[in-house]
Amino acid sequence: MFSIKSLRALAAALPLVLSTFPAFADIKDYEFQLTQKELKQGHGVIVTVRLVDKRTGKPVPDAVIFASRIDMEPDGMATMASKLEPVPATEPGSYSFRTNLTMEGGWRLSLGAKVQGEDGTVESRLILKATP
């Protein structure tokens, strides 16, 4: 069988062996965050979000956003929606959209995205406020 010496050597080497395997993320390890929670009401408003890995706090670039919607659900007007047009963001891991915040009040930004190399979908519903 195994000697005490060989078992001790195996136990000492185990952390090194395990550290060579990549840590697998869960889709729940990612989240969208608003860069500004209050924006001026108006046309052509730019809404920017960051996609971050919650384990490290680092931005996640190159996600594929396939679903996006903005509406006034927080004020009880979910049917009051506005179009979202993707626009280039200034930083990796940031995603920007041009929209019309036609009324002041609460707006809900809903996003669905795929993170490269991960199974599942990151889904977020973020609340922002349009001010006069």
Image: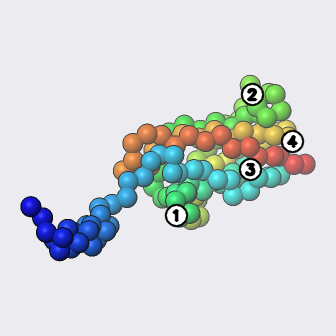
> Residue 56, which numbered label?
1
| Neighbours of disc 2 within 10 Å: few (<14), some (14-19), many (20+) | few
Depth check, mark 4 against mark 2: the one in front is 2
* Residue drawn at (73%, 48%) of the image: 44
Q: How far from the left and from the top, in percent, is residue 94?
A: 57, 58
Q: CA distance from mark 2 to mark 1?
A: 34 Å
The part of the image, by quadrant, that contains residue 103 is top right
Q: Are marks 3 and 4 in contact (CB under 8 Å)?
A: no
**Disc nearer the start of the sequence (2/1):** 1
- The tag earlier along the polypeptide, 2 or 3, is 3
The amino acid sitting under disc 1 is Thr
Above or below: residue 94 compared with residue 124: below
Residue type (three-letter) at the residue carrying disc 3: Val
Name the mark on residue 78: 2
Per the image, label 2 sits on a secondary structure element best described as strand
What is the C-alpha distance between the residues marked 4 and 2? 14 Å
The mark nearer the N terminus, 1 or 3, is 3
Between 111 and 86, the residue placed more toward the observer is: 111
What's under tag 2, amino acid-wise? Answer: Ala
Residue hosting label 3 = 45
Q: Secondary structure at mark 1?
A: loop
**Quarter-wise, where is residue 72 in the image?**
top right
Return the residue found at the far top.
79
Residue 87 visible: no
Q: How far apart are the alpha carbons under marks 1 and 3?
A: 30 Å
Q: Residues within 10 Å of mark 4 (few under 14, many from 20)?
A: some
Of the numbered discs 3 and 4, the one sitting upstream in the chain is 3
